[in-house]
Image (tube, helix red, strand yellow):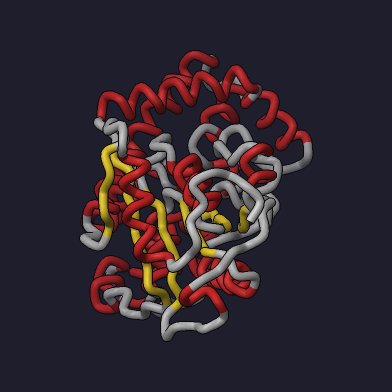
Amino acid sequence: MKSPVVSGQWSGVRQSKTKIVVIVGPTASGKSKVALELAERFNGEIVNADSMQVYRYMDIGTAKPSKEYRERVRHHLIDIRNPDEEFDAAQFRDEASKGVEDILSRGYLPIVTGGTGLYLKALTEGLFDVPKVDKELRARLRKEVEDSGISALHKRLAEVDPVAAERIGPYNTHRIIRALEIFYLTGIPISQHQKSHAFSERPYDCMKIGLSVEREALYKKIDDRVDNMIKEGLVGEVSRIIAMGYRPETKAMQALGYSQICDYIAGKCGLDEAVSLIKRETRHYAKRQMTWFRRDDEIAWFDTKEEDYLERIFGKVRGFAGQVEHTGITEA
């Protein structure tokens, strides 16, 4: 890994707000590759903002950066929790802030990338104050999921908070339960809390880069990625995690890909059906991601089908970063 070369604000003179680069986009859009290219070109390190890549042992199904990528550039917030440990937006904000400060302390440029929109909002724009988890209420809601299915709770959420229900989607058990908890504990929909707060706490000066992929091309990338995950051993990975004692009902194991493979292993469906469901739900997830990100008018979008999109991203970051640029990967 090359030594940092610094200039401008990175030479030890700290500005009133720290500069960070944020790379967003739907799943399978190529965020990891772009973040790596930027990190190598502008002396950066990468902070993961994918809610599932924080979990150990869950490698194939979360599309973690490869060993080669992590050897080329240091990555933060990967493999920091076990699959049965809670991790939410507030914890992410705290851990990511520490990562950013660590990167800055060694003269590097923080590059935050991932597809979990709420996590990115939490880091760059703050979180509203919400009540702590009520264990009794949560247990009751989880029991309702077991008895009636998550669709019943999503329908109830749609009745009390249609905005949140549309954003969350019908299969995200953890977020549906949390949204209902906040409504029951405060009497105010979570979407109204978010609107009132308006994420007004802005600790960083952010350059936000968005990767846009034409829909059919993105769906093809998603299908190919899922097929490759199966070839690389996703079924075996899920089996090993279950054998380690992690229950399929845990939050992490309810993630896209893992939930469907758990059902296959339990004999609830065939492998072809599980794969088809993963592809379908991943496409739906990508659509929700784009709906979320398109609401942020601070994001500069780049169409990945254009041959020069990466060079144009370099140009966008060049005037912002204040780093010495490396046009080749050489020792600094």
Q: Residue at coordinates 28% horizontally, 48% vertically from top-left?
A: 155
Q: Nearer the viewer, residue 179 or 203?
A: 203
Q: Residue at coordinates 38% horizontally, 59% vertically from top-left?
A: 318
Q: Nearer the viewer, residue 177 or 79?
A: 79
Q: Position of residue 322 (x, y in %)?
A: 44, 68
Total marks shown come to: 0
Residue 210 against residue 190 in the figure, above or below? above
Q: Position of residue 178 (x, y in %)?
A: 43, 62
Q: In the visual, does 60 lie left or right of 34? A: right
Residue 79 against residue 99 in the figure, above or below? above
Q: Residue at coordinates 31% horizontally, 31% vertically from top-left?
A: 307
Q: Residue at coordinates 58% horizontally, 60% vertically from top-left?
A: 87
Pick the quarter of the image with the C terminus.
bottom right
Residue 40 against residue 30 in the figure, above or below? below
Q: Position of residue 54 (x, y in %)?
A: 61, 52
Q: Nearer the viewer, residue 132 or 14?
A: 14
Q: In the visual, does 40 lie left or right of 321? A: right
Corner quadrant of residue 171: top left
Residue 32 against residue 141 in the figure, above or below? above
Corner quadrant of residue 297: bottom left
Furthest-right residue in this view = 244
Q: In the visual, does 306 lie left or right of 132? A: left
Q: Nearer the viewer, residue 323 or 87?
A: 323
Q: Would residue 2 be visible to someone looking at this image?
A: yes
Q: Position of residue 165 (x, y in %)?
A: 28, 53
